[in-house]
Amino acid sequence: MSGVLDHVMIRTEDLDASLEWYQTHLDYEEKDRHEGDGFTIVYLGPEEMHEEGAMLEITANHDDSDLEMGDAWGHIAVRVPEDELESSYQQLMDEGVEDYRDPESCGGRYAFVKDPDGHEVEIVKRDHGAKWSIDHTMIRVEDADDALGYWTRKFEYEHTGRWESDTFANYFMKPEGSSEEAMAVELTYNYDGRSYTMGDAWGHLCVRIDDLHDDWDQLMVREAPDYRDPADCDDMYAFTKDQDGHEIELIERDPDADSLFPF
């Protein structure tokens, strides 16, 4: 069982402000929207998306509650062409985006901004994928061996890159044989033994699978946590968790369906 990452979900306190930010500064367009009982979900992404590209899901609850960012989730990263890091960052500054970590402070290799809710957005140089498309989502893990084993055994992901320093290591994981345009999960492991708080400003990663029930059963054989099985979700999707508690949704996609949502 293997599937590409379909989307990453974040929560916002102000849906209109969040949508305006991503649509104005990253040129995202609304792909679909669902109005639920007490919440709204919006899928966003570049106009031209690769078939294995990942979307951003923004969820707004209608109860006006404050969101806690936590530190178990790190950032999403978006792509710009190799020679456009500085100009793309300057474009964002000219548009009024807050100056958080400019390219010079990051050694000219990447940069960071924040969205209106404080979610960190990394800008990375890539020679593939549409500009501003999602390259990876970073999560922090407390045991690198456990995290690597989880993604390898449960989802059949493989290493696509790593970077190690004196104090931490980053491991990038994607399905075997996936395209360059597919989103990776970046596992960040700090060597000092720290623990993390999950918060609620980040929601989940979502893996796009072929058969909800068969793939769920395979995950159970592989001893993935039984968090919300298909029956608990009206047989429309399901949720497991990784070894640190990051939620992972499983969903099928029908390319002929009128909506991206299974509701």
Image (cartoon, rainbow, N blue to C red):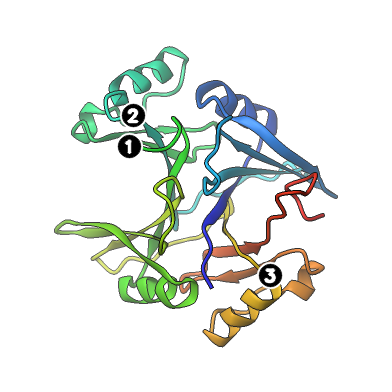
Q: Please state the horizontal and vertical placement of residue 140, each as a whole percent of the image.
A: 39, 60
Give the quadrant of the C terminus: bottom right
Marks 1 and 2: CB-CB under 8 Å?
A: yes
Disc 1: which residue = 126
- Type of the residue with mark 3: Leu
Q: Residue at x 36, y 69 (%)?
A: 142
Indicate whether 46 appears above or below 255. Answer: above
Query: Where's residue 44, x and y in %?
Result: 62, 37
Which label was assigned to residue 81? 2
The vertical placement of 235 against 80, above or below, is below
Q: Quadrant of residue 209?
A: bottom right
Quadrant the N terminus occupies: bottom right
Residue 233 figure quarter: bottom right
Amino acid type at image mark 1: Arg
Image location of residue 71, percent across then percent down: 43, 54
Q: Residue at x 78, y 44 (%)?
A: 34
Q: CA distance from mark 1 to mark 2?
A: 5 Å
Q: Position of residue 54 (x, y in %)?
A: 54, 46
Dot 2 alpha-carbon crowd within 10 angstroms: few under 14, some 14 to 19, many 20 or more: some
Q: Nearer the viewer, residue 214 or 89?
A: 214
Q: Verify CB contact (< 8 Å) between mark 2 and mark 3.
A: no
Q: What residue did someone put label 3 on?
A: 212
**Marks 2/3: CA–CA distance:** 36 Å
Image quarter for residue 200?
A: bottom right
Q: Which is more toward the observer, 86 or 120?
A: 86
Q: Earlier in the sequence, mark 1 or mark 3?
A: 1
- Measured in 3D between alpha carbons, the distance from the residue under mark 1 to the one under mark 3, in whole angstroms, is 33 Å
Q: Nearer the viewer, residue 110 or 50?
A: 50
Whichever of callouts 2 and 3 sits on the residue coming sooner in the sequence is 2
Q: Residue furthest left?
A: 166
Dot placed on the residue nearer the N-terminal end, 1 or 2: 2
Tally of numbered tags: 3
